């Protein structure tokens, strides 16, 4: 697969997009790895992992789509995540107007290394498409850890315990939707949900670029 990654090019094949395709995918690629709005099976699977609402899943992880996620996370350009967020917003209904999008944070060391936070870029793209607010500094990551990509659900939950916190002196919204790049076991979602619940913030659901 030729990933074109320039502005105005398809995320799948790299071909230039016409004006009504600027959100990131040409029609043939949308057909080849479909976005998942309206898929009851996918929504049910995601809800089983997080026990909460599902406001968006971009695609399932496969060898071809995994490369898209990797490039969004490590490619160094937040514009890519924003474009995919806008693409997702075209297919998924917007959450209620009073809901704030909250991206899952990186540890500051990883943020410095990458130059940006991929879930924040995704949230900004979603917010542009949905017309809602993003609060990127509500959560902070307290611990710098190794990747948990291949870890079990129990191992993830244990490692993520006390990993996240709510920043002091920030406005606390009443209801939020968490935004992250990949949904695997749901442990990251539940860890963030737990610390927000302690502060009286209700997490009504989540959005993920991909689901493993």
Image (spheres, rainbow, N blue to C red):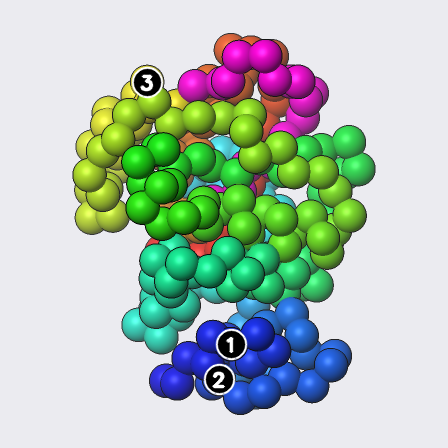
Q: Closer to the camera, 95 or 9? A: 9
What is the span of residues highlighted in magenta in the rendered image? Answer: 165-180
Residue 172 highlighted magenta (yes or no): yes
Q: Mark 1 points at which residue?
A: 6
Q: How crowded is mark 2: few (under 14 residues within 10 Å), some or many (20 or more)?
A: some
What residue is drawn where x is 32% and y is 18%? 162
Q: Name the residue under label 3.
A: 162
Q: Closer to the camera, 15 or 151? A: 15
The disc, 3 or 1, on the residue closer to the chain's N-terminal end is 1
The disc, 1 or 2, on the residue closer to the chain's N-terminal end is 1
User: Mark 2: which secondary structure?
Assistant: loop
The Cα atoms of the two marked residues, 1 and 2, are separated by: 8 Å
The disc, 2 or 3, on the residue closer to the chain's N-terminal end is 2
What residue is drawn where x is 34% and y is 58%? 74
Residue 16 sits above or below residue 117 on the image: below
> Quadrant of the image for the C terminus?
bottom left
Residue 6 sits above or below residue 77 on the image: below
Q: Looking at the image, can residue 175 be seen?
A: yes
What residue is drawn where x is 68% and y is 78%? 21
Q: How crowded is mark 1: few (under 14 residues within 10 Å), some or many (20 or more)?
A: few
Residues at marks 1 and 2 touching, judged by CB atoms closer than 8 Å: yes
Residue 157 highlighted magenta (yes or no): no
> In the rendering, which numbered label is found on residue 14?
2
């Amino acid at each position: 697969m030729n990933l074109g990654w320039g502005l105005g090019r398809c995320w799948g094949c790299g071909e230039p997009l016409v004006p009504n395709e600027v959100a990131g995918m040409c029609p043939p690629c949308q057909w080849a790895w479909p976005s998942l709005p309206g898929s009851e099976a996918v929504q049910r699977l995601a809800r089983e992992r997080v026990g909460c609402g599902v406001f968006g899943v971009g695609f399932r992880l496969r060898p071809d789509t995994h490369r898209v996620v990797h490039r969004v996370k490590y490619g160094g350009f937040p514009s890519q995540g924003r474009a995919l967020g806008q693409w997702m917003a075209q297919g998924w209904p917007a959450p209620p107007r009073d809901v704030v999008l909250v991206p899952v944070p990186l540890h500051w060391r990883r943020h410095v290394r990458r130059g940006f936070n991929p879930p924040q870029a995704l949230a900004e793209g979603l917010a542009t498409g949905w017309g809602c607010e993003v609060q990127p500094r509500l959560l902070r990551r307290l611990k710098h850890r190794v990747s948990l990509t291949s870890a079990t659900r129990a191992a993830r939950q244990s490692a993520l315990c006390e990993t996240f916190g709510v920043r002091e002196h920030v406005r606390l919204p009443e209801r939020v939707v968490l935004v992250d790049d990949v949904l695997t076991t749901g442990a990251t979602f539940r860890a963030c949900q737990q610390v927000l619940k302690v502060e009286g913030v209700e997490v009504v659901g989540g959005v993920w670029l991909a689901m493993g």
